[in-house]
Image: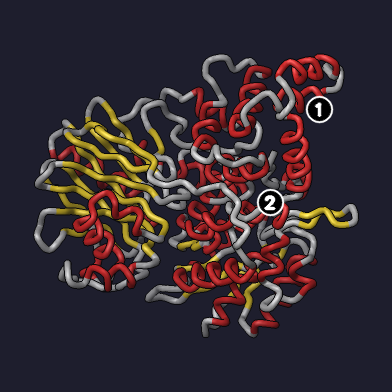
Amino acid sequence: MCGIAGIWSNFDLVTQEKMVDIILKNQKHRGPDHTGKLTVDGITFGHNRLAIIDLSKRANQPLVSNCGRYVIVFNGEIFNYIELREELSDYYDFKTNSDTEVLLACFIKYGVDCLSKLNGMFAFAIYDKLEKILFCARDRIGEKPFVYSEHPTGFYFASELGALYSTGVFSNEPDEIGIAYSYLRNFRHIPEPFTRYKEIRRLEPAHAIIVKNKKIVRKWCYWKPVLEYDSTITEDDILSLLDDAVRLRERADVDVAVLMSGGVDSSAVASLMVQHGLRPKAFTLKADDEELNRAIKVADLLNIPIEVYKYDKGLEKKLKEEMFRIYGEEVRSPISHLAALCNLISKKGIKVVLSGIGGDELFYGYSGAGRQLLFSFIIRLLEILPQKVLVSFEKIFSSNRNLKLIFELAQIENYKRKGYLYRKEAISKGLLNFDYGYLLDYWAQLVKESKFYIDISHWLGLITENAHSITIAADLPGMMFGVEIRSPFLDHRLVELAFKINACKKVSIIRGHTHNKLILKRALREILPMDILYAKKKGLGYGLHANQHYKPNHS
């Protein structure tokens, strides 16, 4: 895990290099182990390194290929780097044991198609001195950040908005559209590609760009899951793939710990780590007594040490201010307690922790999933009715807000329904300057083959709406203190598998009670006790924020 930076501008090189120095200084917390800088063909690259794989100096960045043609700066981890290295061993003469060099070699051999080979969380830039092009990409789920600007003075990029803005190049003109999004429905953050500034963008998850002559000449989405049900998927398939995702994320040349909430997802991750022969230290928060007792029980069952941190609420204001400075804009999701925990973990000398983030999005663990499933069935029955009939029913039930809305939505294509809800809310708030359904429609059309609203909704929650509680929460609190949080449930193979599972196997209503994540819990029966699997959902830090505690809303 690291911080990256690059400037390809019209400024003289002395000025340009000073600006890169400013970026690197402001995001040094991401990589306190080494700071590197290199100027090639008028482009200045910078890197803050958090050494995790191949701790030697030879793996420092920016890294230049053996032939001298390519330069890379890379933030993240390529978890399948060992397998890729073996595949590329006859093609490239490796000088390091790092995943960075494997990524570079993979690009040299496969070009932009290398993205399909990668299992990891990443944001990187590779420059080709012969073709004079810069290739930049971000991982499929958006675990690692990448901010950039195609500015009149050149092309700029960094890992953090606050660091990039600190160069002084950019106007502080606010992006009213991005800011407005952050107050609509489920968003608690400004979603990609927007930032709080009009002149700076965030590269979307699963997107790549090519820059030539300081201008973006191509931008594309390189991945999407297929939301078509596959009845052959078994509980064993889920467990096997989760097991492999955990195994890959255990790879490090430093100690690896685990975040424990006492819930299903983090307990499963910890259990699989132990099955792999590890004895990771567990870290948890003292918040809700019931959740704490579960975490301690799981740690005792696994015979792993657990450290309990009591959150000092007096630190909350300071932590929030620091998160705002680093992230560059507000994130209205209570993750300050996680930042405080990561500070403790860093002080213990731990650089890598595994977490259970993402399991609820893939296997429908939130409380509203039962209602969404019921709605999905109702709307499928209604949508076969003629348009005229639906319009008539909408008028008949105009005095009943919920029924009227159901008949409204039945007239709209499934993948456009959530976008419609955003348009409707934006208009009700007087936001007429933009089509606020556009962003939801963009992501939803990638999976428009899905026939159930619940699946489209959870895909949108994962990839954009709930980033504040998924990818931002897995990057910002940890990287404030040089701690890398790895999330096995966000392995793209598991994402693809999960979205092929019938929603009825994830959420079932039995004797009037909704059971969430049912197929996952059944897959984990052999490794976790029943009282942990079927306990009431809470989460790491549940109860710390009392009435203001935020639970992601999948609606």
Question: Which mark is in front, 1 or 2?
Answer: 2
- Residue toward you, 506 or 490: 506
Residue indicated by mark 2: 503
**Residue at figure coordinates x 75%, y 40% from the top left:** 377
Q: Position of residue 245 (x, y in %)?
A: 50, 67
User: How dense is the environment of label 1, judged by Cα within 10 Å: few (below 14), some, or many (20 and up)?
Assistant: few
Tell which of 338 and 139 is nearer to you.
139
Q: Distance between the residues labelled 1 and 2?
A: 23 Å
Answer left or right for 142 relative to 268.
left
Q: Is residue 349 something that shows in the picture?
A: no
Pinpoint residue 108: horizontal percent, then vertical percent: 19, 56
Amino acid tagged 1: Asn
Do residues under tags 1 and 2 come within 8 Å of each other at their CB atoms?
no
Residue 229 location, x and y as percent? 60, 51
Residue 56, located in which quarter of the rendered image? bottom left
Q: Can residue 196 be seen in this view?
A: yes
Which residue is located at x 71 percent, y 29 percent? Answer: 383
**Image side of residue 454 versus residue 269, left or right:** right
- Residue 523: x %, y % from top left: 66, 69
Task: Give the residue displayed 61% in from the left and 81% down from the top.
Answer: 305
| Location of residue 150 by image quarter | top left
Residue 312 shown left or right of residue 95 in the figure: right
Secondary structure type for disc 1? helix
Q: N-terminal of the two: label 1 or label 2?
A: 1
Question: The C terminus is located in which quarter?
Answer: top right
- The image shows residue 397, relative to residue 274, as above or below, that is above
Q: Nearer the viewer, residue 534 or 90?
A: 90
Residue corresponding to mark 1: 402
Residue 107 lies, with reference to residue 463, above or below; the image says below
